[in-house]
Each structure stands twice: as structure tokens, then as C-alpha cells.
Image (spheres, rainbow, N blue to C red):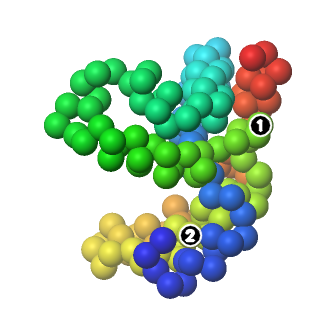
Amino acid sequence: MKTTSAKPLIKRSAFPAQSLLISPAYIEAHPDTVQHLVNALVKAMRFVNGRTAEEIAEKLPPDYFDKKDRSAQIKFIRDTLPTYAKGDYSFSPAAVKLVVDAIQASAFDSSPEGQWRATGENSKVKIDQLYDNRFVRNAMREL
């Protein structure tokens, strides 16, 4: 968070980061595909949460480290591991509200599109329409 007005928001709740953004129409038309995607995300999060940075790095394709400092990349993985989702991987209303509040605390640019985003109908976010934990609950039961 770069803006001073957004920093107090972070202390309120965990900031949900690992997620899938899928349109409601696609979810409605392809629930089995969505479930497979969520299952894969839950498996990946369980893998990451159960391994060290070195173990994670060993599973990355060799070309991931091309033109990169391997030890710096492993340090980056180690440093960011605490920020990954844990537990049941669902979103709470408080966490989703935190994201919305952080976005709304950010300045939009002065372009017509930026101002439309800041003040138009699209800026009125309904928090309960931003997330759907049913696929996560299914994954937690199935896996």
C-alpha cells in the first residue's frame, strides 16, 4: 500500500491474495470446470504451505531460474511464504471488504475513464457479489 490513507485498512483483516477471478456467467455455464480450477488452487496452496522455499524451488521448471539469481529467488519465495493463504482458503466478508476499501482509498487517475471508474455506477461494489466460497468448501471436502 503506497497511500497513507490505505495503510490503516491492512490491520483490520487478512488481505486475500490467492484467488481466481471468474465471471458469474462462466461459473453458471461451467461449474465443473470452475471446481477443477479451485481444486487445483487448493492443492497448490497446500503444497506451498507444507514446503520450505528450497523444496518449492526444486519443483519449479529449470528455465524459471534462467537469467535470475537462484539464491535471490529462493529468498524471495521464503520471504513471501507468510503472505500466502492458509486454512480453508475461503474469503471472509471482512477480507473482501478490506480489498474494496483499499481500492476505493486509492486515487484514480484524472483521465475520463479513471474518473468514470471512481464515480460511476461501476464504483458501487456489492461485496457479497465479489466472492463465492462454495467451490472452496467443495474442494476442502473432496481433497
Tell whether 120 sits left or right of 72: right
Q: Position of residue 122 (x, y in %)?
A: 52, 61
Q: Nearer the viewer, residue 51 or 140?
A: 51
Q: Is residue 64 above or below residue 110?
A: above
Q: CA distance from mark 2 to mark 1?
A: 23 Å
Q: Is residue 19 above or below residue 50?
A: below
- Element marked by disc 1: loop
- Element marked by disc 2: helix
Label 2 CA crowd tier, 10 Å (few <14, some 14–19, many 20+) = some
Q: Which residue: 63% across, 70% down?
A: 10
Q: What residue would you read off at disc 1?
A: 88
Label 1 CA crowd tier, 10 Å (few <14, some 14–19, many 20+) = few
Q: Amino acid at mark 1?
A: Asp
Question: Can residue 52 be seen by looking at this rendering?
Answer: yes
Q: Which circle marks residue 25 in the picture?
A: none
Give the farthest residue toward the left. Answer: 67
